[in-house]
Image (tube, helix red, strand yellow):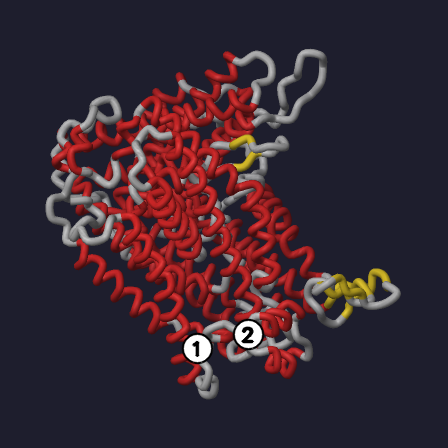
Amino acid sequence: MVNKGAGTATLPVRRRVVAVIMASTGQRRAAGIFMASKEIPAWLLAGNHPPLQPGGRKRRPGFAEKTLRDLAHAGREVLFSEELAGRRGWLQYLEARCKLLSLLWLILVAGLARHPFTLIVLYLGVLFLAGLSRVPLGPFLKRVWLFVPLFTGIMVLPSIFNLVRPGDPLLVLFHLPGPLSLGTWHLPDQLALTRQGVIGAGVLILRVGVAVSLALLVTLTTRWAALLRALRVLRVPRIFVLTLTLTYRYIFLLLKLVEEMFVARQSRQVGRPDRQMNHRFLAGSAGNLLARAYALSEEVYQAMLARGFNGEVRTGGDLHPAGPDYRRAAALFLVGLIILGGDHYLGW
Amino acid sequence: MHIPDGYLSPQTCAVLGAAMVPVWGMAARKVKATLKARQAPLLAIGAAFSFTIMMYNIPIPDGTTAHATGGALLAILLGPWAASIGISIALAIQALFFGDGGILAFGANAFNMAFILPFASYYLYRLLTGRTSLTSGWRAIAAAVAGFVGLNLAALAAAVEFGLQPLLFHTAGGVPLYSPYPLNMAVPAMALAHLLVAGPAEGLITGLVVRYLQRVNSGLLRLYPAGNGNRAAGPAVAAGTLANRQEIISPAANSSFGLKKLALGLVILVLLSPLGLLAAGTAWGEWSPEDLQQILGFVPPGLARLATTWTHTLFPDYTVPGLEGSFLAQALGYILAAAAGLAIIFLIFLALNRLLFRPGKAGTGYNGK
């Protein structure tokens, strides 16, 4: 909840959020027209430069700036993946449901692997796959390894010391005169890195790295519409997939609404608002957004009725996987099986 | 609280995912019964709203910002079942498209944020507000409290999931395979962050929005439960769009049938729970400090302390006394422990239900006939 979206590398992408709404639904023609007129202003997408206060004092970015930054980031992320999904590559040519299932299987393998060596092999395989799919390695690595050490690394850091997790000392940092007890809390007489702690932390970081990379690969190389349709294979009920599709479409509309509210407020605002003002604005914008969203749902429903919706959901344009798709998926499955077998053989 | 992949074992993810299946099924049923065909756009836009609310950075004292989930708000406005679906879908989109929360861990994330959070918030809100008027100031405070408590309960659940990992899944050498902290460390760490930062953010936004809606658009506050007698015929809701409310009020939703199905699902789940025993192999059966001493050569101090101070638990270490021998006996003990846990949860919900929906008046269930 806290620290959301901090694992975001700056990515070189085009800066048009609205285009995504159209692109995701396959209406590229319309997107072209749309793109020219509506853009996120450059200052919104620029780095985190807090506006200067009169008097030259810099201030920390407030909630409004942060919210706007998050909104812009969401748009950029989407564009990046849309662009990659359109490239030619090994995973791009793999049919969506085969890809989803086989990469899900590899994530499961990563989850079940116990030995650091197998995880390293798996990660090299993932990098190879990314290379075959023409995913630019720089941003791909950055996105995974900025996020993983930042969160996972910080989280597991205490666990490598014997204070938290007793074990065989690997490196003694310093000695204390003797074991200390503060109430129920006991301090051993030396502070050391433990072998178990370091290995455990390493395994976890590797595992999270592999799993995050794999999840990223699925979404980077698949068009969203195709991915949503592929969910049907996982026996996700039709109504959920329909809802997902609709949600995905309207997220960008609501994001746009919020962005406009925040920009409007920022442009009206002079000086530093006090806390109560902030709170009132937050409540107002959230409540207003809800009311508008509710009204929108009503309108969408009316529109659906007008177009002949009778409660029956039909998804069209399904492409079926062909021979090469099965072969590729089988290859990925086999690789996972071999890795899992190897992991078992290495034992622990 | 969006748990990424790799922190929880696939076994834990599978169990929590399976726990969500009956909830989702029930939610789809309930929502279908109350909202009929309009469910799709309403849910979709509810999910989009929840997603967007998660983008809001809320200023909290001392200069930092945190973001809320909007889960409590959605639960108060649209009811816990609809909120459950909306948040699940928002979580799915975050996991699939934004790398926020894992794909394997989706079930666990949904369990915390799309089940515990909306239900706890909603029932607490109903309990606190009782029959106060829609515009009373107390409602905003109750909503804030509900948001705060709901989020912290969800965080607590996440912390317990984390904390069980090192006990359940580690190598023979004692190296934890997943999240490395035992319960006595995971729980305070998560609790601190959520009590101080995320919880107040959720409470703040929930309370403020409820207060705002009381002033500006109180119709939205009475959307759920759909059709409370004559109150439903009040002023037009949300820019006069709810013209024919009759369509929303379902006359005869057979809620007992749905509940039966839910109960059946939970029973199956409880019976399946020893799968963890099978899957984890050697890691199980090492619950007692003596065993740990024997296998690891040391006893984690936290565990030792817990084992000595907390002797009055009903089922120590999830095993039933007298049932700690063979695998089958352990499995049986595990089932019993799970059943007891569920029974306690059910009793709490039942008690809340009684308190909220005035006992003695048959049929005042979900649809408020």
* Residue that badge 1 annotates: B278
Q: In the depicted view, which residue is nearer to us: A20 or A193? A: A193
Judging from the image, what secondary structure is the residue with disc 2 in? loop
Rendered position, B317 above or below B161: below
Mark 2 or mark 1: whose residue is earlier in sequence = 1
Rendered position, A317 above or below B342: above
The residue at the point 23 percent across, 26 percent down is B237
Same chain for mark 2 and mark 1? The answer is yes
Query: In screen coordinates, is B292 left or right of B58?
Result: right
Chain for mark 2?
A: B
Q: In the depicted view, which residue is nearer to us: A252 or B55? A: B55
What residue type is disc 2 on?
Thr
Judging from the image, what secondary structure is the residue with disc 1 in? helix
The residue at the point 58 percent across, 24 percent down is A46
| Residue A199, position as x, y percentages in the image | 67, 65
Residues packed near mark 1 inside 10 Å, few (<14), some (14 to 19) or many (20 plus): some
| Residue B305, position as x, y percentages in the image | 64, 70
Q: Residue furthest front?
A: B360
Chain for mark 1?
A: B
The residue at the point 43 percent across, 67 percent down is A334
Q: In the depicted view, which residue is nearer to us: B156 or A332? A: B156
The residue at the point 31 percent across, 65 percent down is B266
Residue A196 circle label = none
Residue B311 circle label = 2
| Residue A225, position as x, y percentages in the image | 32, 41
Asked whether the viewer can see residue A121, the reply is no
Q: CA distance from mark 2 to mark 1?
A: 27 Å
Q: In the picture, which quadrant includes the C terminus of chain B?
A: top left
